[in-house]
Amino acid sequence: MININEVIETNQMIEKENLDVRTITLGISLLDCISDDVDKLCENIYNKITSLAKDLVKVGQDIEREYAIPIVNKRISVTPISLIGASSCKSPSDYVKIAKTLDRAAKKVGVNFLGGYSALVSKGMTKSEEMLIKSIPEALSVTENVCSSINLASTKTGINMDAVALMGKVIKETAEKTKDQDSIGCAKLVVFCNAPDDNPFMAGAFHGVTESDAIINVGVSGPGVINHALEAVKGKDFGTLCDTIKKTAFKVTRLGQLVAKEASRRLSVPYGIVDLSLAPTPEVGDSIAEILESMGLEKVGCPGTTLALALLNDQVKKGGIMASSYVGGLSGAFIPVSEDHGMIEGAECGSLTIEKLEAMTCVCSVGLDMIAIPGKTDEYTISGIIADEMAIGMINQKTTAVRIIPVIGKDVGDRAEFGGLLGYAPIMKVNEYSPKEFILRGGRVPAPVHSFKN
């Protein structure tokens, strides 16, 4: 039973500490839309999305108004399009036609983003999947709301190095296609190892084939709430620090579950999961970096940062799973550079480097996220950065990802401006020694031996 003190405390979190529900994401299966004719397929996709999601935005707004809970985004995820288009798409341009249909449907129902322009190629690529991947630069340059994700690796199957090499080229082409907007197309493109089926966050959301016809997944937030709580225990021991994070994460998650269940009831769609991930914004006071600095670090990126992040991630999960039986997605803490005021400052002053960020990804929810690099960086270096992150995910049996933006026409010392929740990012230095010969070996890196446990 929620008492009046908890209501007052939650209101304070919302009003003064940047607490919000970051997204309600409606997952939609498109498996029953499949057709041998691409035009018929597009018609089926548009009709199903606009039918099932017609009330999503209104329901989100109604819940916001009635419960005084900010819900920042209303989004849609769909079945990976490479699975849906395999029968009808004969060229990359056919896939682009589907991307335009998805964009049109997203605009019709009024959502912020639609994810699922995706392919799952951790062990190998079909010709159709390769066509979708090659279509990404064009697809993301002619749409506004569509997000793309490609799963290149998994603990069970290893790393598809042919796909890793191809994605380095695709990311460069996407950057070139959207160079007039600081290569923002790359901000809507992410590559994964061990991608989850029920992630509500963009750009990596897609509706897994193990899910039901439609599902509601909610992503909570709350870095500001955690940071505020830690201000009260400065100088206390690690036990007190951990308990404080855990108890605060419990409160944040319970709010997310309330919204998820209410959205599920009103839309007559099953409730799936709450993703516990702390998702920062460029606003001061809503930063993962500020949490780490409140623990006692002089500046994010200094020695001790990886442990501080590991502790934060673990306690968020422990608190969250006490508040909800249905926890999924990524669930932990994001460390995007451009979307986090404190991370931006760390990158600008030099305390945070790509190498340190890579170390931090061993213990956080995702990976190298929203990192801007010089536009002159070649495709093989980008593939090498991806390969390293895929290795961390594969060996450690966790989800890792790369969302990297080679900003055409800009170099170290410059700044890329993305706007909104995407914020801005300093261009970070990249190791200029080349992995080209290594990347071009091709084939597949075998799965690690522990993957054979059943």
Image: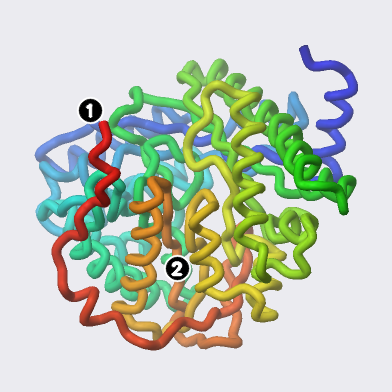
The residue shown at (73%, 30%) is 251
Residue type, numbered disc 2: Ile
Residue 392 appears left or right of 373: left
How far separated are the C-alphas under marks 1 and 2?
A: 34 Å
Q: Quadrant of residue 384?
A: bottom left
Q: How is the image coloured?
A: rainbow
Q: Nearer the viewer, mark 1 or mark 2?
A: 2
Say whether residue 316 is visible: yes
The percent position of residue 96, horizontal first and vertical second, equals 26, 56
Q: Quadrant of the C terminus?
A: top left
| Vertical relation: 175 (above or below) 445 | below
Q: How many marks?
A: 2
Q: Which secondary structure, mark 2?
A: strand
Q: Residue at x 86, y 45 (%)?
A: 16
- Image marks 1 and 2: residues in contact by CB distance under 8 Å: no
Q: Observer-nearest residue: 294 or 6?
A: 294
Indicate which disc, 1 or 2, sits on the residue closer to the N terminus: 1
Residue where numbered disc 1 is placed: 32
